[in-house]
């Protein structure tokens, strides 16, 4: 059992691949000023697109209401015509 552990140890216990300082430098860079500007610009574009989508949804809802009203008027007109024929 111990022999197997010793053989597998070099596969699974290879130690850190990079030093801690290098690790921090690789993964803790943060955003550059240019990246922050891009994020802000993208945020503005996304907010504008979201506002436009809400307007489209509202327009579709308004159009739906208009067609429902129109359908009701058509039904009323058909009823008037049918009653006039009798």
Image: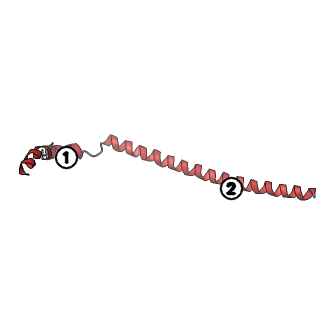
Residue found 38% across the figure and 45% down from its top: 39
- What residue is disc 1 on? 24
Say whether residue 37 is left or right of residue 29: right
In the rendering, at what x and y percent does residue 17 appear? 15, 42
Tell me if residue 36 comes above or below residue 80 in the rendering: above
Of residues 11 and 48, the one drawn nearer to the viewer in this rendering? 11
Residue found 81% across the figure and 58% down from its top: 76
Q: Report if the CB atoms under discs 1 and 2 are less than 8 Å apart.
A: no
In the rendering, at what x and y percent does residue 63 appear? 67, 51
- What residue is disc 2 on? 65
Say whether residue 2 is left or right of residue 44: left
Say whether residue 25 is left or right of residue 83: left
**Distance between the Cα atoms at labels 1 and 2?**
59 Å
Q: Earlier in the sequence, mark 1 or mark 2?
A: 1
Of residues 39 and 10, the one drawn nearer to the viewer in this rendering? 10
In the rendering, at what x and y percent does residue 35 appear? 34, 42
């Amino acid at each position: 059992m111990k022999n197997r552990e010793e053989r597998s140890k070099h596969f699974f216990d290879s130690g850190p691949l990079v030093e801690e300082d290098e690790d921090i430098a690789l993964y803790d860079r943060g955003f550059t000023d240019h990246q922050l500007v891009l994020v802000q610009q993208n945020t503005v574009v996304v907010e504008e697109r979201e506002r436009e989508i809400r307007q489209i949804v509202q327009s579709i809802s308004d159009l739906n209401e208009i067609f429902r009203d129109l359908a009701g008027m058509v039904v009323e007109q058909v009823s008037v015509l049918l009653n006039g024929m009798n």
